[in-house]
């Protein structure tokens, strides 16, 4: 699964990405690709991700992002508590549930 995170500059999500990668490895999910981008790069990444998670600080762009993605992949805002705690396992679970349509 390809999971992309987006935030203001792609920096604040990089720690969450590291924790998600650790959680994926611990769960034997070595085929997962997880990365972060700056919000302006979302359109250029279309087709490269299966799930798009937005950092809580950019939740205000959700409507715009949904128009850009146009149903090609599920989009959600990362749970703020999981994000704040850098809980990679919880954010990974959120991405998996989103991909599964839950």
Image: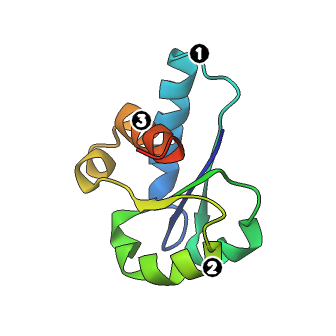
Q: Quadrant of the C terminus?
A: top left
* Mark identifier at residue 93: 3
Q: Secondary structure at mark 1?
A: loop
Looking at the image, residue 89 sits to the left or right of residue 29; the answer is left
Taking the spot 51% from the left edge, 61% from the top edge, the residue there is 11
Q: Is residue 24 above or below residue 85?
A: above
Viewer-side residue, 86 vs 64:
64
Q: Residue furthest left?
A: 81
Q: Secondary structure at mark 2?
A: helix
Looking at the image, residue 32 sits to the left or right of residue 63; the answer is right
The image position of residue 5, as x and y in percent, is 54, 57
Viewer-side residue, 76 vs 22:
76
Front position among marks 1 and 2: 2
Q: Earlier in the sequence, mark 3 or mark 2?
A: 2
Give how far apart the Cα atoms at labels 3 and 2 are.
24 Å
Q: Quadrant of residue 45?
A: bottom right
* Mark identifier at residue 68: 2
The answer to the question of whether label 1 and label 3 lie on touching residues, with beta carbons closer than 8 A, is no
* Disc 1: which residue: 28
Q: Earlier in the sequence, mark 1 or mark 2?
A: 1
Looking at the image, residue 84 sits to the left or right of residue 37; the answer is left
């Amino acid at each position: 699964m390809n999971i992309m995170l987006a935030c203001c500059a792609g920096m604040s999500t990089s720690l969450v990405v590291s924790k998600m990668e650790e959680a994926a490895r611990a769960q034997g999910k070595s085929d997962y690709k997880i990365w972060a981008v700056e919000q302006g790069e979302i359109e250029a990444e279309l087709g490269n991700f299966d799930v798009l998670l937005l950092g809580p600080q950019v939740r205000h762009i959700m409507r715009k992002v949904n128009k850009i993605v146009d149903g090609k992949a599920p989009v959600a805002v990362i749970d703020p508590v999981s994000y704040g705690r850098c809980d990679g396992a919880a954010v990974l679970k959120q991405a998996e549930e989103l991909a599964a349509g839950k």
